[in-house]
Structure formats: C-alpha cells, structure tokens
Image: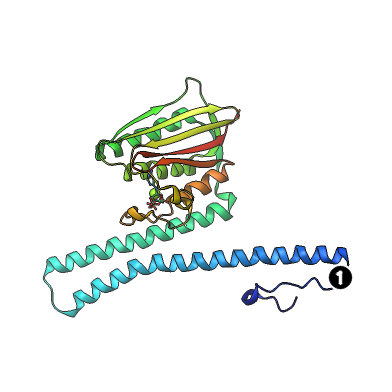
Amino acid sequence: MEEISHSDLHLRIPEMEADAEMRRLINAFNAMIERVETSFAHVNEFSSHVAHELKTPLAIIRGEVELALNETRDIAEYQRVLTVTVEEIDRLIRIIKDLLMLARLDFNPDVFRFEKINLKEFLAEIHEYTSILCEEKGVTSGLTVPDVDCFVRADRVHLRRLFLNLVHNAVKFTPAGGDIRINMAADGNDVRISVADTGAGIAPADMEKIFEKFFRAHDAKTTSGTSLGLSIARSIARAHQGRIDVQSSPGQGSTFTVSLPAAP
Ligand SMILES: Nc1ncnc2c1ncn2[C@@H]1O[C@H](COP(=O)(O)OP(=O)(O)OP(=O)(O)O)[C@@H](O)[C@H]1O
Ligand SMILES: [Mg+2]
C-alpha cells in the first residue's frame, strides 16, 4: 500500500488469501485508487490543454514583436504589430477570466446569490439583447412565453451568463437570413427554456464533445472565442439543479434546452 503514490497510481493491492471482509476492503480501496487515477489523468489532460491555449497567443505576440524589432519599420507597421499584440493579450485575459469563472462555479458554491426570478421578465431582457445582436447580423429573432408567470430560484448574474452564452453561439453559427427563437414552456415541476437557431448545426459525433472545455467543431476552428462558453453554461445549469440538452441537424440548426426546477 505504501508503494502507491501519485506516480504509480496504476498499482493495485492484490487480493491474496484474505477473508471475505478483507477482500471487500481491498476491492473498495482499489476502486478508489482507480477513481483517483482517472482524476489525475483528467487534471493532466486539462493542464496541457490550458498550456496549449495560452501558448498560441504568446507565440503570435512573440513572432510579431520579433519581426518589428528586426529592422526599422514605418509607423503604420508598428501600429499593426501593437494592434495584433493588444488583441492577443485580450484573448489571454479572456481565457484566464473564463478559467477562473469555471473554477469558481465548480468548487465554490458561495458565489451564487439565489433569488426568486420572474422568467418572463428575465427572458424579455435576454431577448431584447438578442434582437440587437440579430439585427447586426441580418438574422430575425422571436420570444415565445406562456400566458402565466413562471418563477425559478436562481442567481440572476449567472443565469444571464448562461443564456448569453447560448445566444452568442446561436448568433455566431447562424448566417444572415436565419432565425433565432427563445421559447419558454412550463412542464410539471420544471421550466424549460430553449434557444433555437437555423444555423450550421452540429455533427452527431460532436454532440457530446461540445460541452467539453476548449472543444470547437472542425468547421468552427477559426472562431475567436475561448471555447469555454458551453462548459460555463453547463456548470451554471448544474449549480441550479438544472441541465442543458441539445438537438441538432447539421446544416439545419440547433436547439439548446435548459431545464430548471420551477419555484413555487
Ligand atoms: N448554436 C450552435 N450551432 C452550431 N455549433 C455550435 C452551436 N453552439 C456551439 N456550437 C459548437 O460547440 C463548440 C463549443 O461552443 P462554446 O460556446 O463552448 O465555444 P465557442 O463558442 O467556440 O467559444 P466561446 O463560447 O468561448 O466564445 C463551438 O465551437 C461550435 O463548434
Ligand atoms: Mg460560445
């Protein structure tokens, strides 16, 4: 047992000739070590992902500055280098902010300030913001809510973040001429709010992966975000005892549905 350390978590305690009780204990211990081993593998994979995401903007900054230092340039060229540098620094700041937010969401429940929220009023605000983004992109938008008021217990700031992440995606992946709909329906003890777009859609093989940190679908490689948006949205939904489901047809559009427990 003393031999099992962080560097050889693959080791297990052999069952040997133990009695039934001791064997149960050994099996439980081995199962626990297996979970620790999996967690270490996740942490390792996550660290290398973070390192890679931070390295890319830094490599761009270094390349640009080195080029500018090599010989005397005109003012316009220096301005271009500084503009690229500021853009890449902003990207680094965005990644770090999003990572800090994820860590807070998943490990510090004290960040949430729950209050009773009238979803019809809340979604009217979200839709107002959505319609501005849609107009800029040449996309139509709409909001459908039931006649009766629906309430949830939620943290307003984080709930807003969740829906804005879904709306930003819908707008980003829907070309001009498309349509984005926000729909609310009360279903027993749950309230379901969906954000549906008529955009690019998601390949069936990518449906599970899109909620992973830093995952971008192949044809979305060029988009500018940190690719932490859906991870953040899912963490916020879970912190509210809710969930996010997605349905999509490539080339036809996607619908993200958030289910939250209704408040009396
Ligand atoms: N509405 C959508 N339509 C098509 N693909 C989507 C949609 N929403 C998400 N995706 C896919 O899921 C991936 C992950 O989305 P996520 O919001 O986590 O990251 P992002 O939008 O790329 O970056 P960020 O949200 O940090 O700006 C996207 O890159 C895209 O491939
Ligand atoms: Mg996004």
Give me the residue at 33% from left, 70% from top. 58
- Label 1 neighbourhood size at 10 Å, few (<14), some (14-19), many (20+)? few
Taking the view exactly as shown, the residue that stands out farthest to the right is 19
The residue type indicated by label 1 comes to: Ala
| Viewport quadrant of the N terminus | bottom right
- Apparent side of residue 169 relative to residue 116 in the rendered image (left or right): left
Q: Is residue 128 above or below residue 25?
A: above
Give me the residue at 60% from left, 30% from top. 189
Q: Nearer the viewer, residue 18 or 28?
A: 18
Give me the residue at 41% from left, 68% from top. 52
Give me the residue at 55% from left, 64% from top. 42
Q: Is mark 1 within 8 Å of ligand 1?
A: no
Q: Is residue 149 above or below residue 260?
A: above
Residue 206, percent from left and from top: 44, 51
Q: Nearer the viewer, residue 4 or 118?
A: 4
Taking the view exactly as shown, the residue that stands out farthest to the left is 74
The residue carrying mark 1 is 18
The coloring applied to the image is: rainbow
- Apparent side of residue 160 relative to residue 112 in the rendered image (left or right): left
- Apparent side of residue 20 relative to residue 47 in the rendered image (left or right): right
Residue 19, percent from left and from top: 88, 67
Numbered disc total: 1
Report which quarter residue 181 is drawn in.
top left
Q: Secondary structure at mark 1?
A: loop
